[in-house]
Amino acid sequence: MKKVYAVKKGKKTGIFYNWDEVKELISGFSGAEYKGFKNEKDANDYLYGLDIEQLSFEDDKTLTAYVDGSFDVDTMRYSYGVVCIFNNEVIEKLCAVGENKDAASMRNVAGELSGAMNAINYAVKNGYEKIKIYHDYEGIGKWARGEWKTNLLSTVKYKEYCDKMREKIEIEFIKVPAHSGVEYNEMADKLAKQALDKK
């Protein structure tokens, strides 16, 4: 099986698939941090500071979801893409378009909020006890946790939804850098764009 490498500290950081490339990035770099993994999810978890040992002991009731949003300025429509992962396998892909005028003022963030809510809904409907939501816009986690003020109706409804669903499922939000080559995040981004392309 081909290894996946995560470089946390080096001349360049990220996920890589070629050991020779990794060697160049860490050679001569003081305090380089890197590790090899069997799959991209574990490599991403290591790269973004999650405890791999802790992850491996989680029960089989946790769903992982990557969410992203998109926006079409010409039509003022927004969309979301969600990639649901269980046991390191993609088990579901969700995407749809929204046309709420109030929400549209938030552009692609409106889509990402919708994506997070639909991911939570999917997890609850399918009997999961916990969901980990990977997102690239900081507010997705901060609004849900009450760390940012909810000044717009869309963010108020989002916070209320997350609070209500926490009675049914444990929700964890994890921020990943936008457009940094994280496979499932890029996949969610493509799903959101594809939804907008459909007439």
Image (spheres, grey):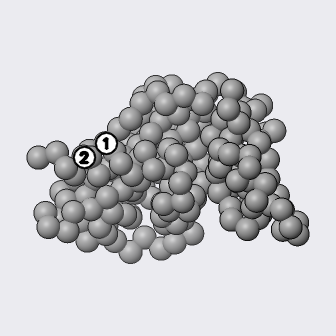
Q: Amino acid at mark 1?
A: Cys
Of residue 154 and residue 193, the one placed in the foreground of this image is 193
Disc 2 to disc 1, how far (Cα)?
A: 6 Å
Residue 173 position in % (x across, y down): 57, 53
Residue 65 position in % (x across, y down): 50, 41
Secondary element under disc 2, as helix, strand or loop, is: helix
Quarter that holds the N terminus: top right
Of residue 180 and residue 107, the one placed in the foreground of this image is 180
Is the C-beta separation of discs 2 and 1 under 8 Å?
A: yes
Q: Earlier in the sequence, mark 2 or mark 1?
A: 1
Q: Residue at x 20, y 68 (%)?
A: 73
Q: Is residue 120 left or right of residue 193?
A: right
Q: Residue at x 19, y 59 (%)?
A: 77
Q: Is residue 53 left or right of residue 21?
A: right
Q: Is residue 108 above or below residue 23?
A: below
Circle 2 is placed at which residue position? 195
Q: Residue at x 58, y 44 (%)?
A: 132
Q: Residue at x 35, y 48 (%)?
A: 190
Residue 129 visible in the displayed image: no
Q: How would you rate the neighbour count of disc 2 (Cα within 10 Å): few for under 14, some for 14-19, many for 20 or more?
A: some
The image quadrant that residue 37 belongs to is top right
The image quadrant that residue 122 belongs to is top left
Q: How would you rate the neighbour count of disc 1 (Cα within 10 Å): few for under 14, some for 14-19, many for 20 or more?
A: many
Residue 160 visible in the displayed image: yes
Of residue 15 and residue 108, the one placed in the foreground of this image is 15
Q: Amino acid at mark 2?
A: Ala
Residue 3 position in % (x across, y down): 71, 36
Circle 1 is placed at which residue position? 95
